[in-house]
Amino acid sequence: MSPRPKVQSMPDLHKQTIHEAAELLAQGKCSSEELVRDLLASIEAIDPKVQAYLTVDAESALAQAREADRNRKGLAGNPLFGVPLAIKDVLNVEGQPCTCGSKILQGYTSPYDATAIAKLRARGAIFLGRVNMDEFAMGSSTENSAYKVTRNPWKLDHVPGGSSGGSAAAVAADMAIAALGTDTGGSIRQPASFCGCVGLKPTYGRVSRFGLTAYASSLDQVGPITKDVRDAAILLGAMAGRDPMDSTTVDVPVPDYTAALQTDLKGMRLGLPKEYFVKGMDGDVEKTVRAAVDHCRGLGAEIVDVSLPNTPYAIATYYVIATAEASANLARFDGVRYGARVDGEDPIDMYGRTRAAGFGTEVKRRIILGTYVLSSGYYDAYYLRAQKVRTLIRNDFQAAFKTCDAILTPVSPTAAYPIGKNADDPLQMYLGDIFTVTANLAGICGISVPCGFTGGRLPIGLQVLGPAFGEEKILRVAHAYEQSTEWRKAKPEL
Amino acid sequence: MSGKFSQTADKIDVRYVAHLARLHLTDDEASRFQGQLEQILGYVKELSTLNVDGVEPTAHAMPVNNVFRKDEAKPCMDREKALANAPKERHGQFVVPKIVE
């Protein structure tokens, strides 16, 4: 054996969390450029296996990093300064592509920053690249991307979840320090749980949707997918707040979310809804989540039974409302102002051909369903009725939060499943969203935090749901749980 | 997670609805969607078993009404930027097929 030269290497920079990287940067132990270069090397080595990124903007990321290194006074008290992030390909970053995972936006370049992006940019965050997703965020497995199939870093022939599957896979595989996703029916929380990350869906109105390509406007929210709860608190705090460009943002003060990160749950009442522990759910998931509930009791929480009786109607309600809104939102892709165009005999023919060529199967299916439930003669029976059931679901939560501070549930009835398993059975795929869609319908906040593994070594997530603008409560619960367990230290072998 | 599928779902004319959505379908897509959407609508029909008399519909989970901004002129995206992604443009405008003969 020939002796190898011993190199005193830096800590694995790509493995750092935001707050760890910020500390290294602040202490001068690494530069932002070194951090970006280390991540680029990690992407080059690992992404051929995982396929999380659609595009990596190396040149611009390095330029941003060098700029951060020159201007180190921005570091003070700002953990995002010089830290690279992966962005779901549905949020506009000026000068970068934004395909939404769709062929119809191939070649599109964003002319402006989304508000969430602009706020992070103002704090010195670096936008490293665009990560894969289900086309227009329609899907639960990232298999609906027009570009590539992203793989679960824990088991490469399994899905990473969706629709923010690229974000979760990139974070889990240490190809990003943290990422942004979007959540319309679980698209942050479910991939985070499938990949063993933390994922937070903020209260509706907490984070601006300006510059997020809309899927279902009354349900969509932007949120973080991170390696730990502290990072989720940091990113949420940086993005939250009223935005004149999004009239649905609410003028509620933005607290320092990291101040809520305590390590015990004394004095907290946590609700356990029986409707979220149902027949047909995976045995490992149920066992693991129940053990996490017991663990929270051990941390000082009082566990109380709550009931959310309209839960069985949530999937039907969600797929009526979300597809109705999508059918209107996606009307803008008509081949006139941006994206692909297929010429036709007249404008109507051009729209039809352009959309036929540009949209994938799931998007077409949802546009037709959404158009149908809004069409004359069916509006009352489907859309209006679904909006009324939405009220009942919202009332369920309001009643439950009178008796508890937060609610504990599984994120998904199963862990990640093999690629292709539900590919041609849309209803079966939809049913997997049962535990996540309710938070979007009710407009409340939720977080997914790793709580164990299946026998097959696939991550399982615990969901903590909180009342509207109760992000501090769910962050506290998730943080106390996370810090008193070891799950966050487990990493996939790649 | 077994859904109950009612057999009494409304009939959906996939071709007609696709036309309303300005979406051309192949024969294969139309027949595949027909079966899948009927199955989904059968599942959705379960909503009709709930009593929603007197329940107000929720359009937005966080009711914020009458949000006004000051009525003042502000700079907007310049023309060049706005046209940069256009599939066809000429003389600083989007080009579309002729609408009126």
Image (cartoon, rainbow, N blue to C red):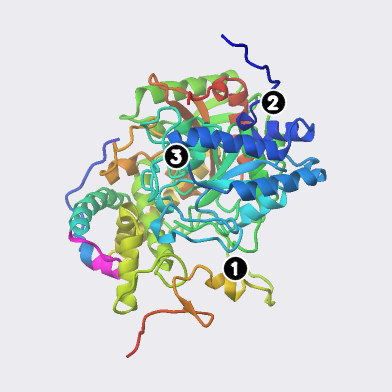
User: Residue B85, percent across and down?
Assistant: 50, 67
What residue appears at the point 34 percent right and 71 percent down from the top-left corner?
A351
- Circles 1, 3 touching at the beta carbon (< 8 Å): no
User: Residue A326, percent across and down?
Assistant: 40, 59
Residue lying farthest to the right in this orientation: A73
Q: Is residue A120 above or below residue A345?
A: above
Q: Are marks 2 and 3 on the same chain?
A: yes
What is the distance, in whole Å, between disc 1 and disc 3 at their CAs?
Answer: 45 Å
Disc 3 marks a residue whose amino acid type is Gln
Pick the residue in front: A439 or A95. Answer: A95
What residue appears at the point 51 percent right and 24 percent down from the top-left corner?
A293
What is the distance, in whole Å, between disc 2 and disc 3 at their CAs?
Answer: 27 Å
- Circles 2, 3 touching at the beta carbon (< 8 Å): no
User: Residue A65, percent across and down?
Assistant: 70, 45
Q: Chain of mark 2?
A: A
Element type where label 1 sits in the image: loop
Disc 2 marks a residue whose amino acid type is Met
Mark 2 neighbour class, 10 Å CA radius: few under 14, some 14 to 19, many 20 or more: few
Q: Is residue A269 above or below residue B97?
A: above
Q: Are marks 1 and 2 on the same chain?
A: no
Numbered tag placed on residue A51 in the rendering: 3
- Residue tagged 1: B66
- Circles 1, 2 touching at the beta carbon (< 8 Å): no
Residues drawn in magenta: B16-27
Based on the picture, tell me whether residue B26 belongs to the magenta stretch. Answer: yes
Based on the picture, tell me whether residue A188 belongs to the magenta stretch. Answer: no
What residue appears at the point 58 percent right and 32 percent down from the top-left corner?
A227
Which image quarter holds the N terminus of chain A? top right
- Residue tagged 2: A10
